[in-house]
Amino acid sequence: MKGFILLKNKFKKNEIEVALSCVVLLFLWQIIAIKINNDIYLPTINQTLRSLYEILSQERSYLDMIFSTGRSIISFIVALMFATIIGILAYISTVIRNFFKPLNTLANSIHMMIVILLALIWFDKNNAPFIVGFMITFPILYENILGSMIELDKSLIEMANVYKVNLKDKIIKIYFPAIKFRLTPIIASTISLALKVVIAGEVYGQPSYGIGTMIQVEKINFNTSAIFAWLIIIVLISVFINIIQNKISRSTFTWKR
């Protein structure tokens, strides 16, 4: 009980410190913006909030948010499906594991901008951001899935072999739980990463709808306050994803409470 109270007090202290940090940063933002007195370089908080209100007042803005978030989530889900299948096959077969090792190393080494440019060359502007999200998140998911199975208790696998457990039951009852516990803590960060690269792809590709498309439009118009407003929206979407992930984590790791 005493430990729980100390932990609770620690969380409250952390929350106060984070809130204080936010207040200080906002204060510095406002002071610097007033000092510069040029909204093209740095808008004030009031100008940004005004632009945020204007963005949220337009129906098209919600379509832009839905398309960008949808591309990010779909690219994550597709990457997760491929990473799970290939990860399990790579664990079972060293041939497949060695085949994907240089490909995965190459994918981790290529800069995000090169991936975006290649995607724009190979695919149309509406599909390129989705491809970018897939190519960036797949190596992360693949490495974690393969790592979760490599770290499995060998005695558990040996026992399954002794009792002649078929491959399907091994995957469902042994592999999948290990993958779930390894992936759950990184879901939000991976989707947030996908969102960032998808939006970056939209900035360069200019699909019909997308947050990146609107950021590029505002950049052409030198509307910096609107760009800051879109950044706030991106942060809020990421926060929402983190809240969902925390709920999933609590249900997954109930045994830790």
Image (spheres, rainbow, N blue to C red):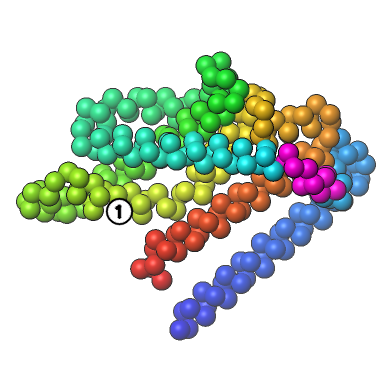
User: Does the rendering let one see residue 143?
Assistant: no
For the N terminus, give its image quadrant: bottom left
Where residue 127 appears, as percent x and y from the top left, is 55, 26
Residue furthest top in the image = 121
Residue at the outermost front position: 59
Q: Which is more toward the observer, 42 or 86?
A: 86
Picture coordinates of residue 6, whole percent (x, y): 52, 78
Highlighted magenta segment, given as a residue range:
50-61
The residue located at (86%, 35%) in the rendering is 40
Residue 43, visible in the rendered structure: yes
Q: Does the magenta segment cover residue 60?
A: yes
Amino acid on which the number 1 mark rests in the picture: Pro
Looking at the picture, how far across and down is residue 189, in whole percent? 52, 47
Q: Residue at x 66, y 62 (%)?
A: 18
The number of numbered discs placed on residues in the rendered structure image is 1
Residue 9, image quadrant? bottom right
Q: Quadrant of the C terminus?
A: bottom left
Residue drawn at the location 80% of the way across and 40% of the way down: 226
Specify few, some or many for label 1: CA neighbours under 10 Å numbering under 14, 14-19, or 20 or more. some
Q: Is residue 4 magenta?
A: no
* Residue carrying label 1: 177
Image quadrant where residue 100 sits: top left
* Nearer to the camera, 131 or 33: 131
In which quadrant of the rendered view does residue 78 lie? Answer: top left
**Dot 1: what SS?**
helix
Q: Position of residue 20 (x, y in %)?
A: 72, 63
Q: Is residue 221 above or below residue 8?
A: above
Which secondary structure type mostly characterizes the magenta part of the structure? helix
Is 134 above or below relative to 171? above
Q: Is residue 92 left or right of residue 224?
A: left
